[in-house]
Amino acid sequence: MSKLSVIVPCYNEEENVAYFYDELMKQDAFFRDQGLELEILYINDGSRDGTVAEVKKLHEKDERVHLVSFSRNFGKEAAMYAGLEQADGDYVAIMDVDLQDPPALLPEMYRYIKEGYDSVATRRVTRKGEPPVRSFFARKFYWLMRKISRTEIMDGARDYRLMTRQMAEAVLSMQEYNRFTKGIYGWVGFETKWLEYENIERVKGETKWNFWKLFLYSLEGITAFSTMPLMFASFMGVLFCVLAFALIIFTIVRKLIFGDPVSGWPSLVCIISLVSGVQLFCLGIVGQYLAKTYMEVKKRPIFIIKERI
């Protein structure tokens, strides 16, 4: 029999662990008909509630349920990477435990895999239930990434994906510390089928992603898959050098022709403030890339496992 590994990152999701299992088991008959052995990998990302206890209860009932528990919260990206590393299935799926990724799509996704696709990914066509401000900036982020990066990142893409072992190994080969998996999927390539579905709200609990965390996550994506901000900083430097040279010529000509010294300290203060602001902005861009490089060269582990069942 072939094996399907379902990776489920969890952070303070004790209310959803059992609900997810019950929904996934509704597809168990299909898996058996297809000759698929199922394993469920709950990746506990340093939860502080009863998530681990709930997973252990499921393991006692069903030995196909496994637990990988981190020593602390390393983030969802680390949890997904750990799941891929621990999974040994011929096919690997990554799903959210809050049921915003409907298990009912798995049979259709598997059929596309059998047709020859290397992965089947999902994207939301609506953002119903999200705050309008978050939806606006999310769309702008994907628009910006399409403009400044050669890596394909689909608007509304979810982490919910079913892939072959070959593609999973390709993703694992990307061992960078600062991870942006949506970009990694596009970078490794392979033939992908996109499935669209309407946004589904969480079953229970609250999202762990606030606006600030999403903003920082978008910076990870930009710095990981585009050097355009560095080119922008260089362009601004050249532009202001040219502008400064032109102003020097203008000042000299004005003095020679009109004998009028340049006056007006308010305008001078405004110019200095503008140039200083642009310099600090460009320095911040360089600092972001330097910080990522600094974290990479340390070679710290992406995650640390405390317990494995």
Image (tube, rainbow, N blue to C red):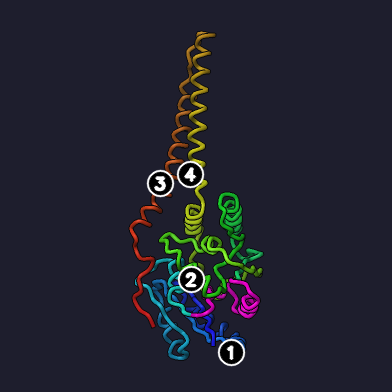
Label 3 element class: helix
Amino acid type, mark 4: Leu
| Circle 3 crowding by C-alpha within 10 Å: few under 14, some 14–19, many from 20 | few
Q: CA distance from mark 2 to mark 3?
A: 32 Å
Mark nearer the N terminus (2 vs 3): 2
Label 1 element class: helix
Mark nearer the N terminus (4 vs 3): 4
Q: Which quadrant of the view contains residue 154?
A: bottom right
Q: Residues in magenta? A: 89-118
Q: CA distance from mark 2 to mark 4?
A: 31 Å
Residue at position x 48%, y 52% from top?
A: 223
Q: CA distance from mark 4 to mark 3?
A: 10 Å
Q: Position of residue 93 (x, y in %)?
A: 54, 75
Residue at mark 1? 32
Label 4 element class: helix
> Is 226 part of what is drawn in magenta?
no
Q: Nearer the viewer, mark 2 or mark 4?
A: 2
Q: Nearer the viewer, mark 1 or mark 2?
A: 2
Q: CA distance from mark 1 to mark 3?
A: 52 Å
Mark nearer the N terminus (2 vs 4): 2
Q: Which quadrant of the view contains residue 201?
A: bottom right
| Circle 1 crowding by C-alpha within 10 Å: few under 14, some 14–19, many from 20 | few
Q: Position of residue 210 (x, y in %)?
A: 50, 61
